Image (cartoon, rainbow, N blue to C red):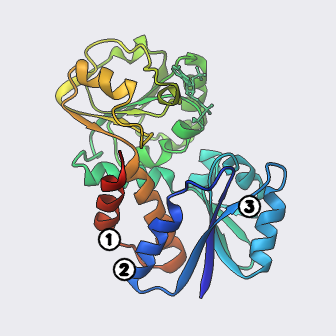
């Protein structure tokens, strides 16, 4: 039995063990997947211990994704640019990858919001936003505007990804500068929803068939999604699908087989309040 784990602090409420157990059952893979609580000052030691015990890979969650980026011996290009690692693959060394952006791209496909040629507005310029920019560019968006409360942070992110923006799709600025609308997809990657706040966005961002997407999940209709509905977005989505899809991408890295996510998506959805 190959061992895997998710490591974080806190970790008790992680859905990853259930998600990966379902994937393993569906694909008939002989593996175990546990949740590890690392002390805040004990991440590297906990990783080393799990590896020494024969662990084959890990998922990394809050607050260790940046430390995992530091710890990896090698990084995939998408992880290097994300500045954060959510997946370790243990072989002769520790490979760090980041499947969050790929998970978001997959989820948007599943939701019927294809990204090729789409105009996308990304709200936020912290770690969550940074983690999804390269996969969004690579998915073929026609426009990706990064908007943030602190406009300079959005512009810094644009500069960070400039070398991967051969088609010139990136732009950045404050909320008001995002008014170059409408957008096909608007993605909330700020942490505002955690305090039930919505960014003060200008009107007119949404066309009648636009999708408003909040990366958080399990909080019902967030302040951002309510605002988007009131501003005319016809389709609303939370980040539960992204959670499942980033897990499926990690599972595929480890096991070489991509699970069908439909059943897990439905099960988790049904369990939410
Ligand atoms: P994360 O890893 O979740 O992205 P982070 O790196 O601390 O967390 O980034 C938080 C993001 O949410 C930032 O873009 C932040 O805006 P600033 O750069 O201006 O600080 C944004 N954010 C947090 N609270 C917000 C609020 N109440 N309204 C709008 N944006 C908010």
Q: Residues within 10 Å of mark 1 (few under 14, many from 20)?
A: some
Q: CA distance from mark 1 to mark 3?
A: 29 Å
Residue 219 location (% of width, % of height): 41, 37
Residue indicated by mark 2: 26
In this rendering, the label closer to the viewer, 2 or 3: 2
Residue 265 position in % (x across, y down): 33, 59
Lower position in the chain sequence, tag 1 or tag 3: 3
What residue is shown at x 35% (from left), y 44% (from top)?
273
Give the Cα separation between the discs numbered 1 and 2.
Answer: 8 Å
Query: Could you tell me residue 49's position as x and y percent?
Result: 81, 72
Q: Which mark is residue 260?
A: 1
* Quadrant housing residue 266: bottom left
Whether label 2 touches label 3, CB < 8 Å: no
Q: Secondary structure at mark 1?
A: loop
Residue 101: x and y, percent? 47, 50
1 or 2: tag closer to the N-terminus: 2
The residue closer to the viewer here, 26 or 18, is: 18
Instruction: Label 3, secondary structure: give it.
Output: loop
Q: Closer to the camera: disc 1 or disc 2?
A: 2
Left or right side of 4 for 119: left
Q: Is residue 17 above or below residue 220?
A: below
Which residue carries the number 3 mark?
A: 72
């Amino acid at each position: 039995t190959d061992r895997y784990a998710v490591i974080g602090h806190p970790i008790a409420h992680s859905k990853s063990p259930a998600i990966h157990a379902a994937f393993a059952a569906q694909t008939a893979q002989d593996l175990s997947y546990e949740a590890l609580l690392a002390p805040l000052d004990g991440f590297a030691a906990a990783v080393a211990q799990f590896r020494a015990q024969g662990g084959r890979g890990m998922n990394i969650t809050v607050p260790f994704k940046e430390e995992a980026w530091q710890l990896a011996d090698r990084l995939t290009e998408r992880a290097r640019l994300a500045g954060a690692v959510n997946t370790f693959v243990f072989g002769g060394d520790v490979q760090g990858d980041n499947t969050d952006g790929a998970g978001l791209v997959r989820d948007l496909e599943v939701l019927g919001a294809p990204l090729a040629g789409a105009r996308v507005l990304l709200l936020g310029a912290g770690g969550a936003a940074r983690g999804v920019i390269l996969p969004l560019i690579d998915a073929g968006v026609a426009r990706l505007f990064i908007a943030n409360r602190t406009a300079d942070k959005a512009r810094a992110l644009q500069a960070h990804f400039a070398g991967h923006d051969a088609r010139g799709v990136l732009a950045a600025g404050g909320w008001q500068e995002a008014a170059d609308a409408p957008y096909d997809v608007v993605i909330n990657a700020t942490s505002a929803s955690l305090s039930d706040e919505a960014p003060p966005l200008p009107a007119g961002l949404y066309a009648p068939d636009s999708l408003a997407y909040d990366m958080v999940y399990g909080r019902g209709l967030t302040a951002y999604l309510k605002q988007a509905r009131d501003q005319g977005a016809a389709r609303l989505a939370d980040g539960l699908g992204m959670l499942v899809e980033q897990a499926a991408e990690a599972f595929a890295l480890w096991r070489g087989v991509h699970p069908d996510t439909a059943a897990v998506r439905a099960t988790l959805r049904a369990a939410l309040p």
